[in-house]
């Protein structure tokens, strides 16, 4: 329960910081801050939930209220995945809408920290709580405390990874099937599972090769046959199939809700910043990094996004230094996949869902814990600055 305790304390501090930032600021009344207040309306300047519902948050509230066909919801709302607003709506049966959204962020944060701590413990981390601290102090971790999908996605992802790696139960299939209903980033988690599967097979192949050389009675059987017998293809195939089931459920949901199974894809096209085809075009990714940037926090081609993209890619070196290939399998698809699809828009937020793996490798290998604590303190300072801007409805990521 140590991870849950850390999560709840951090949640209380971050929520308090957001509210103080909002209510003590004198800048919120300017016109720019109010331009996209579809849910609350530009006349509401005092409600406690305003700093939690900025930008994407207002879409999720609109969807939880009215669904995907309400005339007052922008067409681009179809770009947003259905599980999170559905959960808000369910909790709203017993709680006021905003309290339901707030409680959901508390529960999902506690949940993902619980699974992260357990995963760290079972991976042999010397201090598994460090993985939790690294994740919660990350500069954009406050998104798990506002009305966004970060907390839910982290909960489902780490719940899946925990069951996939250790319990090897059908619970892994449930978490995997729910991920595609939460965010398209589930595609990269599935890619991580595929990479981890191949890594496991080649490890079995190497062990089988050694066994066949040392055991005369096994010499007549090839290492490949031995590896195929010892490796549990069926389990991994079922886990990957669960992601496919979740993807089909996503299409079925939009088919029922809007009459068009591909309405979600069309909605994402309205933002015109991401394309799956870019994943196979490294030239596009390099061209983005070399492009000229004229602003720190602009919506596109800004320096802040590029700094985070470069830092995230360099983070892969940590896994290579400590030869932690299992965690690298999950980290790289999440980082490169999200960075390469578009032009860096919101990448500081997107990187958050890959940070737990970075936290795990540090908690597992770094003996000088003060270094991790110092890094967490620096990241937390930047997080306080960013959540201040976010509370004022200013674009940061």
Image (spheres, helix red, strand yellow):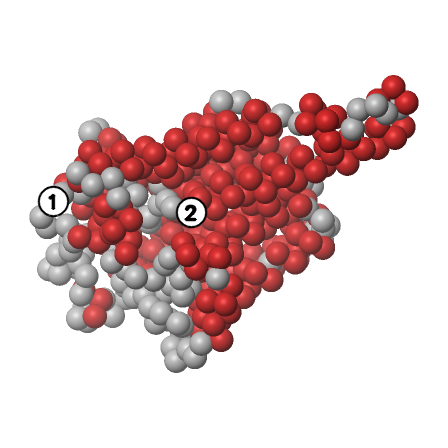
Q: Quadrant of the C terminus?
A: bottom left
Q: Is residue 387 left or right of residue 365?
A: left
Q: Position of residue 11 (x, y in %)?
A: 41, 45
372 lies above or below 241: below
For the question of whether residue 54 can be seen, the reply is yes
- At a point 47% along the width and 56% down the height, the residue shown is 279
Q: Secondary structure at mark 1?
A: loop
For the residue pair 337 and 175, the one nearer the viewer reads as 337
Which numbered disc covers residue 146?
none
Q: Is residue 81 left or right of residue 280?
A: left
**Near-viewer residue (1 or 55):** 55
Q: Position of residue 241 (x, y in %)?
A: 46, 30
Which residue corresponds to the image point at 59% horizontal and 32% vertical from the top-left? 165
Q: Is residue 199 left or right of residue 25?
A: right
Q: Is residue 288 above or below residue 86?
A: below
Q: Residues within 10 Å of mark 1 (few under 14, many from 20)?
A: few
The residue at which mark 2 appears reads as 185
* Image location of residue 210, percent across then percent down: 84, 32
Residue 207: quarter of image:
top right
Query: Residue drawn at (37%, 44%), measured in percent from left and top?
Result: 183
Residue for badge 1: 70
């Amino acid at each position: 329960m140590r991870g849950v305790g850390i999560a709840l304390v951090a949640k209380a501090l971050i929520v308090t910081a957001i509210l103080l930032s909002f209510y003590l600021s004198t800048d919120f009344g300017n016109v720019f801050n109010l331009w996209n207040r579809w849910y609350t309306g530009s006349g509401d300047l005092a409600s406690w939930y305003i700093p939690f519902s900025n930008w994407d948050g207002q879409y999720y509230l609109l969807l939880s209220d009215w669904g995907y066909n309400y005339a007052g919801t922008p067409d681009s709302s179809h770009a947003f995945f259905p599980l999170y607003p559905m959960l808000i709506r369910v909790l709203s049966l017993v709680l006021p809408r905003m309290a339901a959204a707030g409680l959901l962020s508390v529960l999902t944060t506690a949940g993902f920290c619980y699974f992260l701590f357990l995963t760290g413990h079972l991976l042999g981390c010397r201090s598994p709580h460090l993985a939790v601290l690294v994740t919660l102090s990350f500069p954009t971790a406050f998104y798990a405390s506002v009305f966004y999908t970060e907390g839910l996605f982290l909960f489902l992802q780490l719940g899946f990874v925990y069951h996939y790696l250790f319990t090897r139960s059908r619970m892994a299939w449930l978490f995997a099937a729910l991920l595609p209903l939460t965010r398209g980033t589930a595609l990269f988690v599935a890619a991580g599972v595929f990479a981890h599967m191949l890594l496991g097979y080649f490890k079995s192949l190497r062990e089988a090769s050694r066994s066949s050389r040392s055991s005369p009675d096994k010499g007549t059987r090839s290492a490949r046959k031995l590896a195929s017998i010892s490796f549990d293809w069926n389990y991994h195939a079922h886990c990957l199939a669960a992601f496919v089931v979740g993807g089909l459920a996503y299409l079925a949901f939009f088919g029922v809700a809007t009459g068009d199974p591909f309405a979600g894809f069309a909605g994402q096209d309205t933002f015109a910043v991401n394309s799956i085809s870019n994943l196979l075009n490294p030239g596009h990714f390099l061209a983005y990094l070399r492009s000229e940037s004229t602003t720190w926090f602009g919506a596109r081609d800004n320096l802040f996004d590029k700094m985070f993209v470069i830092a995230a890619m360099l983070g892969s070196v940590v896994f290579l230094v400590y030869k932690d290939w299992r965690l690298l399998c999950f980290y790289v698809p999440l980082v490169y996949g999200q960075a390469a699809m578009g032009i860096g828009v919101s990448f500081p937020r997107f990187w958050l869902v890959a940070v737990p793996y970075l936290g795990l490798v540090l908690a597992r290998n770094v003996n000088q814990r003060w270094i991790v604590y110092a890094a967490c303190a620096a990241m937390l300072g930047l997080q306080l600055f960013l959540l201040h801007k976010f509370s004022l409805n200013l674009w940061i990521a």
